[in-house]
Image: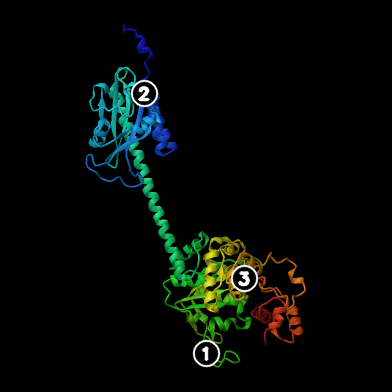
Amino acid sequence: MPAAPTAPELCAPDWRTQELLLLSQVVRAIGKSLAPETVLREMLHLMSELLGLNRGRIVLIDGLDLTAPVPRRRGDAFGTASIRYAYGLTRDEAARGRYRPGEGVTGRVLATSQPAVVQDVDAEPAFLFRAVARARLPPETVAFIALPIEVDGQTIGVLACHRIRSRQRQLADDVAVLQILATLAGQLLQLQQHVAARTRTLEERNALLTRALESAAARYGIVGTSPALLHALGELERVSSATASVLLLGESGTGKELFARALHLASPRRDAPFVKVNCAAIPETLFESELFGHEKGAFTGAHAARAGWFEQADRGTIFLDEVGELPLAMQTKLLRTLQEGTIVRLGGQREIPVDVRLVAATNRELEHEVAAGRFRRDLYYRLNVIPIRLPALRERREDVATLALHFLSRANQAHQRNVHLAPAALERLAAHDWPGNIRELGNVIERLVLLAEHPTVTAADLARFLPAAPPPAVAAQAPPPTAAASPIVRDYLRRDSHSAQELAAALARHGGNQSRAAQSLGLTPRQFAYRWRKLQPPRA
């Protein structure tokens, strides 16, 4: 019969179970966090608690940047190394653990990349007792184990610990476990290096892309570096080489024409014509002639044939601004041109091929126009192949100061003035909502340059140029202001803000003078003329 187990054997821990528990807990810690300071300290703690490997420390070369590739070195080609992570050492003890190449057991492991197993620290002349004095160690025979930690084939540190020599566990078993832990520590540090290098590469690439977008913005004359603007510019750059139609969406005054021109300049068609057509400024009776041209004798006054805007834009880009203003009849003819790539001049029979990239813009909700029957659904789908939304100025407040200074410089040069904006004034401009967007900001800056009473405009001075509050909903019902009470800043009004009767009454009050009539209604002469022309019945 086998002999009964002795008392010490009954009390001995199950070392294999302890080893597996240690390794599983270390792997679990790595799964929770890849931060070396978290995982390595937990590793040293578990070495002590589960295997009795006490005063564990991880020594790393001083000045080593683990966010960059580890430099190649030969032998002892490093300055000093010190304890970076420890368990069971006081702060002072850890601080004393500094080693030169080849100095002591730890320095020798670093210099030679060979593990060291000291059976008895008292019998080893190279053992320094630098971190922990001999008096602080147990009176029994103490062993010391030190193994190299490698990253990318280079020894960058040492995993070391103390161990009571006389234990019911083989020293070789502890060395085997420590070799696994040293390998894990090296892989963790190498992973941190790769993540840091990847992060640095991505940051550099993002910086390059941002600079490229910023330079693209400067090249196209688009001012600003806000994320919303750069996103729209990025979309523009990505579709610039395509031939599909682009629909620029956004509020009035967000710079649609500038973006359309930028799309043209970024495309292979940059050397061909860029033709801009403001659909809101063309009388309904002239749409076909303006867009598609006419033959001689097509109508009264057509003394010669004329190429329309589509022909003039051949091999280039045509920009249809305010495309929502197109009458339904013209929408049909535009759709046919886009589908077939040909036009027929007014009064003509011959189909003329045209190669044109169409960019359209609107501040209307075309989906609502389609639902109301005012815009053809099939044309909407044809235009909306690549929609790009331009951000309102309130969505890119970080660009307001840059834009304001840009407009200020331009206005000063144009009017030979030397007006400046105080920092508080720039902050006040950035806080404004700008319902008229960039166009409104440019107009305010120009008026400011012309009307400022002092060379430096303060936030208090700026107040008279900005509306104090949005106009009330009943503003159109209020009596028209007199010329003397006309505000410096006119509110932005819809194009149908005044009826034909209101315009005619204002003209009658001012003896047919459109400028005075416009001023009495709070309009510019151009706004008045546009509304007056739009509301007149078509000529027979």
On screen, 323 above or below 65?
below
Which residue position is annotated with label 3?
375
The disc, 3 or 2, on the residue closer to the chain's N-terminal end is 2
- What is the secondary structure assignment of the residue under circle 1? loop
Amino acid at the residue labelled 1: Ala
340 or 417, which is in the foreground?
Answer: 417
How crowded is the residue under tag 1: few (<14 C-alpha within 10 Å), some, or many (20+)?
A: some
Amino acid at the residue labelled 3: Phe
Q: Position of residue 64 (x, y in %)?
A: 32, 43
Which residue position is annotated with label 2?
51
The disc, 2 or 1, on the residue closer to the chain's N-terminal end is 2
- For the residues labelled 2 and 1, the Cα–Cα distance comes to 99 Å
Q: Where is residue 83 in the image (x, y as percent from the top left)?
A: 34, 34
Label 2 close to label 1 by CB (< 8 Å) = no
Label 3 close to label 2 by CB (< 8 Å) = no
258 or 521, which is in the foreground?
Answer: 521
Quadrant hosting residue 379: bottom right
Amino acid at the residue labelled 2: Leu
Q: In the image, what residue occupies the spot 38% across and 31% down?
A: 92
- For the residues labelled 3 and 2, the Cα–Cα distance comes to 79 Å
Instruction: Give the left or right position of residue 66, taking residue 119 as reference.
Output: right
268 or 469, which is in the foreground?
Answer: 469
- What is the secondary structure assignment of the residue under circle 3? loop
Which mark, residue 305?
1
Q: In the image, what residue occupies the spot 76% across and 81% down?
A: 505
Is label 2 or label 1 in front? 2
Which mark, residue 339?
none
Is label 3 or label 2 in front? 2
